[in-house]
Image (spheres, rainbow, N blue to C red):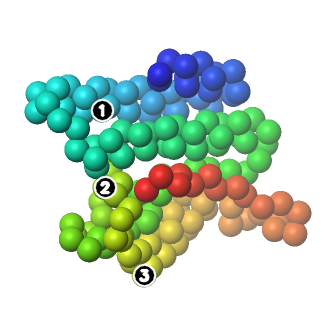
Amino acid sequence: AVGGVIELLKELAPPEITDPIEERFRQDEKDILSVVQSLRMINTVPAVTMEVVSGYGEIWSAQTLYAYLKTKGVPCDWIDAREILVVKGDSSGLGEKGAASTGGVVPLWAETASRMANWWNTVGKENGFLDLDYTTTSPIVVITGFV
């Protein structure tokens, strides 16, 4: 599966854009393989594990769209929503990266807003988003939807 995604990525954008993304995809592939090997040992697949593994498709899609937009000269970046959005679940405490269950969760807006502001003032600033003339152009931030 990863090979096909990387092949598509390389059709869309040059190596200076795709190389770091391909590196992340290959690391994700190793992580997924580790999870699958662990599941083989316990002979069961918890629902949250399925959600985490299937969530990689969303993450890869966001990065692929980001790569394409970069080739078109669009000021852009991508965000893994798990790095920004913080939720509190009914029974499992605070959501963490990789905690994909969406049932019974409440966003913690203050913490989420703080993380987004931090991203905007660091990564957004590095990308020149703060210097754009918003009357003529706007950045596009591709954010994963599978949290």
- The amino acid pointed to by label 2 is Ala
For mark 3, does the 10 Å Cα neighbourhood hold few (<14), some (14 to 19), or many (20 or more) residues? few
* Residue name at image x 59 percent, y 28 percent: 18
Q: Residue furthest left?
A: 42
Structural crowding at the residue carrying mark 2, measured as other residues with C-alpha within 10 Å and reported as few (<14), some (14–19) or many (≥20): some
- 138 or 95, which is in the foreground? 95
Vertically, is 97 above or below 27?
below
Q: Which residue is mark 2?
A: 99
Q: Which kind of residue does numbered mark 1 sit on?
A: Asp
Circle 3: element type: helix
Residue at point 61% right, 36% down?
64
**Contact (CB < 8 A) between labels 3 and 2?**
no
* Distance Cα–Cα, label 1 vs label 2: 15 Å
Q: Earlier in the sequence, mark 3 or mark 1?
A: 1
Position in image of residue 110 (x %, y %): 42, 81
Q: Residue furthest bottom?
A: 110
Q: Which residue is mark 3?
A: 110
- Residue 38 seen in the figure: no
Give the alpha-carbon distance from disc 3 to disc 2, as whole Å: 19 Å
To which residue does mark 1 refer? Answer: 31
3D distance between C-alphas at marks 3 and 1: 31 Å
Tell me the residue at 59%/18% (across/down): 7
Name the amino acid, label 3: Ala
Look at the picture and state if 109 lies above or below 58.
below
